[in-house]
Image: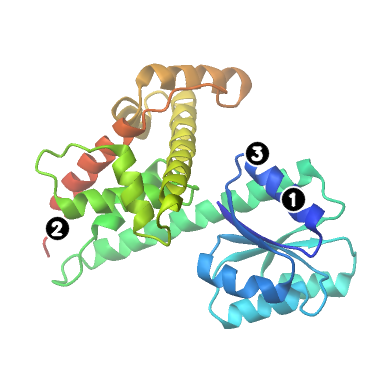
Amino acid sequence: MRYFIVDDDAASRRMLKQIILEGDMGVVLGEADSGENALEPILSSDPDFVLIDLLMPDLDGIETMDQLRRQGFKGHFIMISQVVNKEMIGEAYEKDVEFFINKPINRIEVQSILRKTSERFILKKSLMTIRKSILHFEEETKEETHLTMKDVVLSILSEMGIVGEVGSDDIVRIIMLLSEREEATMQVPSLKGLYEEIASKTRFSGPEIAKESKAIEQRIRRTILAAMNNIATLGVVDYTNPEFEYYAPRYFDFAEIRVAMKEVQESGSMPKKIKVNIKKFIQVLFVDSMDKFRRKPSK
């Protein structure tokens, strides 16, 4: 998930950022010490969630949310507050606030709330992808209606339960880049080169490209780990599950999947140290996506 933090208290911003990063909850795109200073960077960075303080001078949390909505922001809000005022809380919920984080900030409470909101967000995006796929299927007889390459990639990521994960956008960008090249050998070139090319196509330049390339790699690694966790969990529940049977041996090193399954079965969580083969995942996803895209109905 991608977060932006708005709070006039520097200590609160620092603590929230630390909780997000150390808990692998996602990335913090930026932070601001006031509602006024938050508007432009939030609109330009388009985070998934804005953690925003209710009481701030000049422009409070609710007023900031109103201005962002009027300017087209579609993301979600999590309110931070040390004031228990039913009227203000009611007004915040009317503005589509997802949850409240109480001050003083508690690490366990924050992690619990961010997990819940993240799960909701991923579910919504998965449902949207499914709806889009259904619409395409229902209209496939219309000449101008076709599944795009991006739709195909998202449908595969959705089946693995990682649409909306922190690195899913990076993975989609890489597959789209490879498909535009139409690699004759269907072989994925240097990952480092791909990361740098993706970084250069965004707002990064010069020395920032190398830094963003490393960030892209880490986001993709965490997303593939999430996919491994989902697939391993499927295997624990039902070893004959068709999605497990298809994705486990093709997209991952099966020995690592077995290690993950054992840990999930024994402790309910992924092992702390597990190997992630990013190149294999990208390679198989590229081949699968191209194959499904080429076999889509022509009309």
Mark 1 surroundings within 10 Å by alpha-carbon count, few (fewer than 14), some (14 through 19), many (20 or more): few
Q: Secondary structure at mark 3?
A: loop
Q: Which residue is mark 1?
A: 14
Classify 204 as above or below 23.
Answer: below
Q: Residue at x 35, y 27 (%)?
A: 252
Residue 230: x percent and y percent? 47, 34
Q: Is residue 95 something that shows in the picture?
A: no
Between residue 143 and residue 154, name the one nearer to us.
Answer: 154
Q: Which residue is mark 2?
A: 297
Residues at marks 2 and 1, CA–CA distance in whole angstroms: 51 Å
Mark carried by residue 23: 3
Residue 295: x percent and y percent? 13, 50
Q: Amino acid at mark 2?
A: Pro
Q: Secondary structure at mark 1?
A: helix
Q: Secondary structure at mark 2?
A: loop
Classify 186 as above or below 240.
Answer: below
Mark 2 surroundings within 10 Å by alpha-carbon count, few (fewer than 14), some (14 through 19), many (20 or more): some
Q: Residue furthest bottom?
A: 70
Q: Residue at x 42, y 22 (%)?
A: 257
Which-is-in-front pick, marks 3 and 1? 1
Which-is-in-front pick, marks 3 and 2? 3
Classify 145 as above or below 201.
Answer: below
Between residue 98 and residue 62, name the one nearer to us.
Answer: 62
